[in-house]
Each structure stands twice: as structure tokens, then as C-alpha cells.
């Protein structure tokens, strides 16, 4: 499960960065940086979903083959 650990670390860094942006209190709307961070979070969620599906499929194949 090292992939999940890596994803958690990336998400923690991104969350900390977003929290810092919120603390700055900018009322300028969405910046390019915020949009990029959001896109990275979405990509991380898609990767995490793919990993979960792959793990479930592998386990299902092991059970059906036993």
C-alpha cells in the first residue's frame, strides 16, 4: 500500500498549501494557483480511486480463482 501513503502525503501538502492561501485572506477570487491545486486534488482523487478499484479487482480475482 505504498501508493496510498504517497497519495496521503501529497494531499497533506496540498491541503496545507490551500490552508495557507485561505489564511492570507485574498478576496481576489480564484487565482491560477488555486485552480491548479484544485486540479491536482481531483487528479489525486482519480488516482486513488483507480488504485482502490485495482486492489478490489485483484482480490476478487484471487477469490474466484481459489
Image (tube, rainbow, N blue to C red):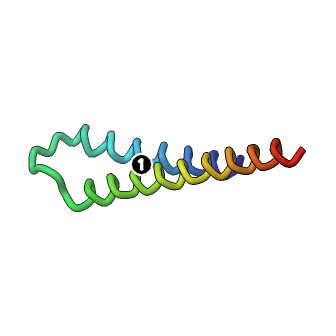
Label 1 SS? helix
What is the crowding at mark 1: few (fewer than 14 residues within 10 Å), some, or many (at least 20)? some
In-front residue for pair 5/42: 42
Kindly give the residue lying farthest to the right in the view shown. Answer: 66
- Label 1 sits on residue: 14
Where in the figure is residue 39, as x and y percent of width and height?
A: 34, 57
In the drawing, does residue 25 fall left or right of residue 36? left
Q: Is residue 18 above or below residue 33?
A: above
In the drawing, does residue 21 fall left or right of residue 27? right
For the C terminus, the quadrant is: top right
Q: Quadrant of residue 26?
A: top left
In-front residue for pair 65/7: 65
- The residue at the point 63 percent across, 46 percent down is 5
In-front residue for pair 52/5: 52
- The residue at the point 47 percent across, 53 percent down is 46
Where in the figure is residue 6, as x and y percent of width and height?
A: 61, 51
Kindly give the residue lying farthest to the front in the view shown. Answer: 64
- The residue at the point 46 percent across, 49 percent down is 45
Where in the figure is residue 9, as x and y percent of width and height?
A: 55, 47
- The residue at the point 9 percent across, 50 percent down is 28
Where in the figure is residue 61, as x and y percent of width and height?
A: 77, 49
In the drawing, does residue 27 fall left or right of residue 3? left
Q: How many marks?
A: 1
Q: Is residue 65 above or below residue 25?
A: below
In-front residue for pair 46/2: 46
Amino acid at each position: 500500500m505504498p501508493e496510498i501513503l504517497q497519495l496521503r502525503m501529497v494531499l497533506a501538502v496540498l491541503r496545507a498549501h490551500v490552508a495557507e492561501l485561505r489564511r492570507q485572506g485574498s478576496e481576489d477570487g480564484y487565482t491560477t494557483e488555486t485552480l491548479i491545486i484544485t486540479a491536482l486534488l481531483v487528479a489525486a482523487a482519480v488516482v486513488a480511486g483507480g488504485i482502490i478499484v485495482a486492489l478490489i479487482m485483484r482480490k476478487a480475482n484471487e477469490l474466484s480463482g481459489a
